[in-house]
Amino acid sequence: MRNRFITAVRLFCMVAFCVSAACILILSAAAEETHTPAVINVKDFGALGDGVSDDTAAINLAVSSLRDGDTLYFPSGTYLLREHGSRSIILIQDRRDLTIRLEKDAILQMDEVPDQSTGSETRHYIFHLLNCENITLTGGRLYGDRLRYTGEALVQHGYAIRLADCRSVTVSGVEIAFMRGDGISVFSDTNGENGLRGRCYDVTVEDCHIYNCLRNGITLTSVTGCVIRNTEIHGIQGTMPQAAIDIEAEYEGSSDENVRIEDCYFYDNGSWSIATAGNVSGLELVSSVLEDRITIGPETVGVRAEDCTFGMVGVSGSDTAFTECRIDGLTLYGGEAVCDNCTFDGFRAISYRVLVTDVEGTAKGSFLNCNFYGRGLSALGGCIVFCHTPPDSLEFSDCTFRSCGLIPFLGYLKDVERDGCFFDLGWACWLCILVFSALVAFLIRRRIRKKKRVCR
């Protein structure tokens, strides 16, 4: 009887222990799920924001206390950041539903990076977001060490923001300047199965100002779904590529898909407003002014531009379309372009508006309801369309050519179709001006000679 009682007590204790453990786990999970989002103020962790003290350790201490749903807050001040050989100055990893909020006059200033930290494996980033989801980074200014750097080499290893393998990230209202690399880099740090790289998804950059960086304003190397809106990028000069936006799927298995650039202004950059290379598809350009050159690489498919102003545009890719755009000059490097209701009216001293070159027999161009205005050499007797090599097809329908010099077309034109196109006599105007000028000069010279005879 006693043995049965002892056994019953032991069984009861075991059941009670299991129930208690289960309750503890359930309550812990519930507490985790019901975590009240907190505002983590970096000054509460020792950051001074005086522009003199090194705030790197204090900020990272604040970051280590972040939980999903929290806000990392930077009050007004200048926070000096020093890189000590690590790739990331501020690393935020495996977090969800975070907000990183900087006051408008909060500055994160990267101090000069030491020379021993400039190797290819020590690229440094002010903010490095790795494998995060639903993140908003808003406000403030991120300054690199370009103006502080005293080394001789143009080392391009300072970045403001790096997004790697993230989902649903918004960067809004941020000023980025003086980086010795890129302003924003969207990348992947992982290699998946079958050699496919990881990628970022649903990235938005809006209301930002990026300028005076050494390498690129924004680099996209592996992203699906990216919107860049109402953003100004200029003064990107130093080391190649020197592009406002470099869309470059440069690694095996990487690609850039569904990128939209809207209401942006890019100017005074060293090489390009936009450059694409590698596997790029679904690029949309809407209501933007891109004064520098545009280059569309041979592997780029599906570019759509509407209501934009371009400088020089080079097309090597396929399925490219421009609608109601103003373009200085278009070069078809074996590429394919459809232009509808576009105006070719560049103010640069170029002798053509459309140039076909480089790849024989593969360039295709269709121009519908377009206006071509001659300036520079083309208005002084040159031509509007110049074909170095014979295109596969070139079609002009209901187009207008004005001030186009002696002839609007020159080169291999056997397959060129001209349907309902209007050609004016721009060369005749110049000829009349030349004759009139010669006549006036002759009369002036005759009058001068006549006065000399009277004086004698």
Image (tube, rainbow, N blue to C red):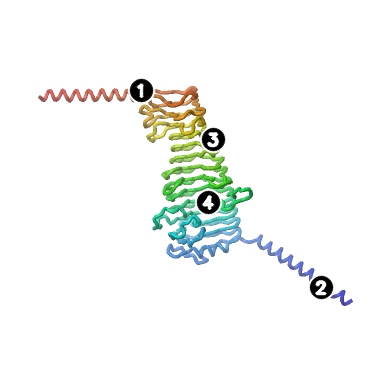
Q: Position of residue 32 (x, y in %)?
A: 66, 62
Q: Earlier in the sequence, mark 3 or mark 2?
A: 2
Q: Earlier in the sequence, mark 3 or mark 1?
A: 3
Residue at mark 2? 10
Disc 1 marks a residue whose amino acid type is Ala
In the picture, the disc for residue 428 is: 1
Q: Is residue 258 shown above or below 401?
A: below
From the viewer's perspective, tell me whether residue 196 is left or right of residue 79. right
Q: Is residue 43 shown above or below 424?
A: below
Residue at mark 4? 171
Which residue is located at x 46 percent, y 32 percent?
Answer: 357
Which residue is located at x 54 percent, y 50 percent?
Answer: 186
From the viewer's perspective, tell me whether residue 173 is left or right of residue 201. left
Of tags 4 and 3, the one toward the viewer is 3
Q: Earlier in the sequence, mark 2 or mark 1?
A: 2
C-alpha distance separating marks 3 and 1: 38 Å
